[in-house]
Image (cartoon, rainbow, N blue to C red):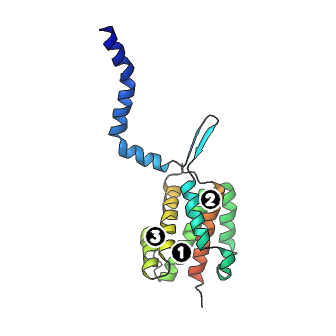
Amino acid sequence: MDYIIKIIEALAWPVTIIVLAKMFQTQLTGLINRISRLKHGDTELSFQKQLQEIADKAELKHNPDSRQEHLIPDDEETTLVFKLLNVDPLSAILVAWERFSDAARKRLGDESPMNIGLNLIRKLNQQNLIDEPDLDILNFIRNVRNSAAHARDTYVDKETAQRICSILLQLANELEHPRGT
């Protein structure tokens, strides 16, 4: 009898953890997907790979060196974005996204502040103002922006944030100053 009690005692916590994990699987999966950095003691894990991959993809398509007519604008708002990168990369992404959204709404002729996010970038795509690769890039950046706005515990390193901001500012400039005009 003591042997059975010891087995039950030994298995109680592991079984409880497994049952709880199974019960809250959906919530835990969502939480884990939002984690971008995990630190315990001297060990730190970074989940920046997906952010860096999308930034790499965008930079290949939007390389300022190969598209001189659409460089990042040199104005107060751009200066603010790049100053914010040193203080709060997430805020810099929010400001750059707002600049992109404003340019997109103006280009679409719909300056309603309610025309944001997914709806906005879909309209840009439907009117052939952005192509499918840009749509994918912007959807990913939109998710980063949403995390930055609504889950301030999100971590984006300064370099990746700078790349995202550069892409958004360049796309905004392309929408504000289309080729051939």
Image side of residue 147 versus residue 25, left or right: right
Gap in angstroms between the C-alphas marked 3 and 2:
23 Å
Q: Is residue 65 above or below residue 82?
A: below
Q: Mark 2 — residue?
A: 160
* Image quarter of residue 61: bottom right
Q: Is residue 49 above or below residue 43?
A: below
What is the three-letter code of the residue carrying label 3?
Ile
Which mark, residue 102?
1
Q: Mark 3 — residue?
A: 116
What is the three-letter code of the residue carrying label 2?
Thr
Do the residues bearing badges 3 and 1 touch, measured as CB atoms within 8 Å?
no
* Secondary structure type for disc 2: helix
What is the three-letter code of the residue carrying label 1?
Asp
Could you say which is closer to the camera, residue 165 or residue 54? 54
Could you say where residue 150 lies in the image, as x and y percent from the top left? Answer: 49, 55
Q: Earlier in the sequence, mark 3 or mark 1?
A: 1
